[in-house]
Image (tube, rainbow, N blue to C red):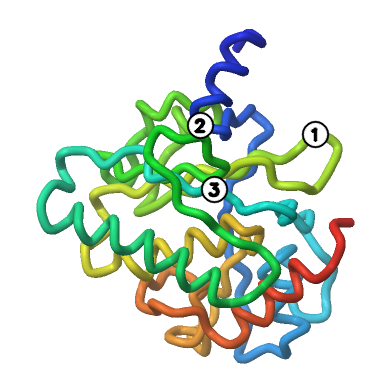
């Protein structure tokens, strides 16, 4: 992508993701409940209990609101599904802001400049993402959802994020899934592969049931944004 095109894309989406963009993914298996400290290290840097970080600790600069735009809802979501999609994003932002973790998310219009862009696309699990116009997102394979982050060069600061939802996600799971993906987009990228956390954490692996942040989710977000970026 030439510089002029990259700048134009960034002005529209603020998430012109290069090949070095990181996908919010993976899960770490744990046998049961963790201490708050171990929970935080797992979700923030994929550290197994008692082990070392296996991913960088990434966070936003939170001096000003982080803008979130619902860029696109394809016709496959028209009617009740569209209303549920809109509501899911609204409630996820409300839940994260209510965590009082030192950042603020602000909803903006679909064509406004934004740091986080959300797409509900007419794709099924296993399809290749296309049509966002974002390098590092288009061409990636989607599961039920996909979240990708752009990182500032030579730093651990998140510069932008894109969340893509597929039609394979059940309408009833929209709210829980959007809460999970927005939480991951804040830098808590790793899920917990632990039956003990089903219904207790929005970051529980392979589940889309919890529509509010768990107590340890909130504690982890507060710790994440209380500490300076390394």
Element type at marker 3?
strand
Could you tell me how many numbered marks the image carries? 3
Q: Quadrant of residue 227?
A: bottom right
Instruction: Indicate the position of residue 219 as horizontal and vertical percent values.
Output: 67, 82
Camera-near label (1 vs 2) is: 2
Please determine whether, in this image, residue 204 is positioned above or below residue 67.
below
Front residue of 137 and 9: 9
Camera-near label (1 vs 3) is: 3
Real-space Cα separation, disc 2 to disc 3, in angstroms: 11 Å
Residue that numbered label 3 is attached to: 67
Real-space Cα separation, disc 1 to disc 2, in angstroms: 18 Å
Q: Which residue sits at x=80%, y=71%? A: 226
Q: Which residue sits at x=60%, y=51%? A: 66
Q: Earlier in the sequence, mark 1 or mark 2?
A: 2
Q: Earlier in the sequence, mark 2 or mark 3?
A: 2
Instruction: Indicate the position of residue 24 as horizontal and vertical percent values.
Output: 58, 52
Q: Is residue 40 left or right of residue 80?
A: right
Q: Which residue sits at x=38%, y=68%? A: 91
Element type at marker 1?
loop
Q: Quadrant of residue 159?
A: top right
Real-space Cα separation, disc 1 to disc 3, in angstroms: 21 Å
Residue that numbered label 1 is attached to: 153
The N terminus, quarter of image: top right
Task: State if disc 2 and disc 1 touch (CB < 8 Å).
Answer: no
Q: Quadrant of residue 69?
A: top left
Instruction: Indicate the position of residue 12 as horizontal and vertical percent values.
Output: 49, 26
Q: Residue furthest left?
A: 79
Q: Is residue 197 left or right of residue 230?
A: left
Q: Residues within 10 Å of mark 1 (few under 14, many from 20)?
A: few
The C terminus, quarter of image: bottom right
Numbered mark located on residue 46 in the image: none
Residue that numbered label 2 is attached to: 13
């Amino acid at each position: 992508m030439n510089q002029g095109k990259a700048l134009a894309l960034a002005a529209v989406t603020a998430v012109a993701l290069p090949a070095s963009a990181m996908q919010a993914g993976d899960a770490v298996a744990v046998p049961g409940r963790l201490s708050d400290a171990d929970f935080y290290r797992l979700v923030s840097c994929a550290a197994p209990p008692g082990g070392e970080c296996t991913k960088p600790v990434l966070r936003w600069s939170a001096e000003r609101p982080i803008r979130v735009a619902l860029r696109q809802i394809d016709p496959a979501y028209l009617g009740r599904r569209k209303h549920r999609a809109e509501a899911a994003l609204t409630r996820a932002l409300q839940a994260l802001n209510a965590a009082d973790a030192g950042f603020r998310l602000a909803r903006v219009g679909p064509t406004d400049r934004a740091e986080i862009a959300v797409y509900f696309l007419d794709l099924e699990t296993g399809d290749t993402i296309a049509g966002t116009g974002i390098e590092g997102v288009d061409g990636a394979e989607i599961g039920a959802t996909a979240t990708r982050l752009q990182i500032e060069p030579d730093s651990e600061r998140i510069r932008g994020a894109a969340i893509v939802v597929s039609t394979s996600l059940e309408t009833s799971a929209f709210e829980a899934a959007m809460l999970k993906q927005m939480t991951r987009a804040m830098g808590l990228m790793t899920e917990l592969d632990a039956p003990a956390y089903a219904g207790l954490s929005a970051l529980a692996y392979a589940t889309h049931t919890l529509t509010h942040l768990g107590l340890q989710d909130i504690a982890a977000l507060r710790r994440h944004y209380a500490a300076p970026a390394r």
